[in-house]
Amino acid sequence: MSKDYIRPMSKTWYMERSYWRRFMVRELTSAFVAIYCVFLLYAAYQAKSADSFSVFFEYLKKPASLIWHFVVFLMVTWHTITWFAAAPKALRVYKGEDRVPEPIVAGAHFAAWLVVSLVVAWLVMG
Amino acid sequence: MASNAATTNGSGAEKTITLEVFRYLPDEDSEPRYDTYEVPYKQEWVVLDALNWIKDNVDGSLTYRWSCRMAVCGSCGMMVNGEPELTCSSFLRDHYPNKIRVEPLSHFPVMRDLVINMDDFMHKMEDVKTWLIPKEPRNLEDGEYRQSPAELAEYKDFSMCINCMLCYSACPVYGLDSTFVGPAALALGQRYNLDSRDGAEDERADVIQSDHGVWHCTFVGACSKVCPKSVDPAGAIQMGKVKGTTDWIKSKLLPWGSK
């Protein structure tokens, strides 16, 4: 009887709203997390002997490697921030009848992140 | 500093605001058009007041849904400058002096002007079975169901949904593939799953835990941002994923299966 009008989404739909753009950035950073995991596996493989690792270690000092690591650091940091900020949605904590506020659940994640980072930094540099 | 004045001036021209309204007549148009209206600007007016003014004074054929004008009925959801909002609680003053573009809720077929076809959403609520299905039949003489405040607190947030469908307009996953059950229907499914009086979680799992259910969600989180009743559908869906995963692990590890 009636003909409804259908409005298809554009191919660049994610540019249209700010929260969609932020979502796409978050998803993009996850690619860097995955790629760096593969990179770490390769690094572990190079550690099979002291010789191969020292060659690999020299490559790590090159400017391209430093830039690559800086970019990965920014991406993974942003991914971690958005991941922990989203954590209270999946982890609803109740204290009796009252829900523990989302900032407290997220804050606990950030605090744990800070503690783990400090322990790792102490192990590596201390 | 006229921009902050609470009342219109006694002398001089009345202040106005421009509304660009999406118009579509299914019997006459093949494409929609935008009609522009100059509407009196009042600080306490919402977009719905402006639409009512147009309908009363300029064009009686302008078609849109509304009822309670107090963010309870969930009828008047529309796109206001590209954002899904209840037009009864979207103030002109938040946009003045810029113009306001009013469109039907995105991601839904348009029936006429600002009215969308909500059949898909109604079918999805049926599929999820968004009503109370008691664990066992109960006679009148057994008396009322008892529920502690803590049991109520578990689902109360999710029970505030007014079926306004703003979350569907915020969700790109639904916009790209309408087979996704979507935020409100999944949140309402969770609302009954979490209710201590309900016993139909397994029945609902056929839909909620399917590829079109919670596992279609990529956690954009926009549904929870636009929800006018703070229902947090994104939270409900992530809870559904956690529950589905733990049930699956239990069914693999425990010889007597899940539960």
Image: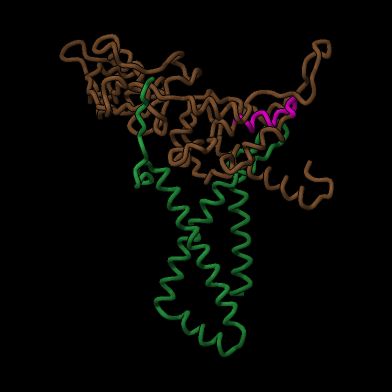
Chain colours: A green, B brown
Q: Which of B110 and A76 is in front in this view?
A: B110
Residue A65, magenta (yes or no): no
- For the question of whether residue B65 can be seen, the reply is yes
| Quarter occupied by the C terminus of chain B | top right
Q: In this view, does A126 lie to the left or right of B195?
A: left
Q: Hey, which residue is sitting farthest left in the picture?
A: B12
Residue sitting at x 34%, y 43%: A10
Q: Hey, which residue is sitting farthest bottom in the picture?
A: A51
| Quarter occupied by the N terminus of chain B | top left
Residue B52 place in picture, x, y as percent? 33, 13
Residue B169 place in picture, x, y as percent? 43, 33
Residue sitting at x 60%, y 82%: A47
Specify the segment rendered in magenta: B188-199
A25 versus A65 height, above or below: above
Q: Which of A64 and A48 is in front in this view?
A: A48
The quadrant holding residue B135 is top right
Residue B197, magenta (yes or no): yes
Q: In this view, does A35 lie to the left or right of B63?
A: right
- For the question of whether residue A89 can be seen, the reply is no
Residue sitting at x 38%, y 20%: A1
B25 versus A51 height, above or below: above
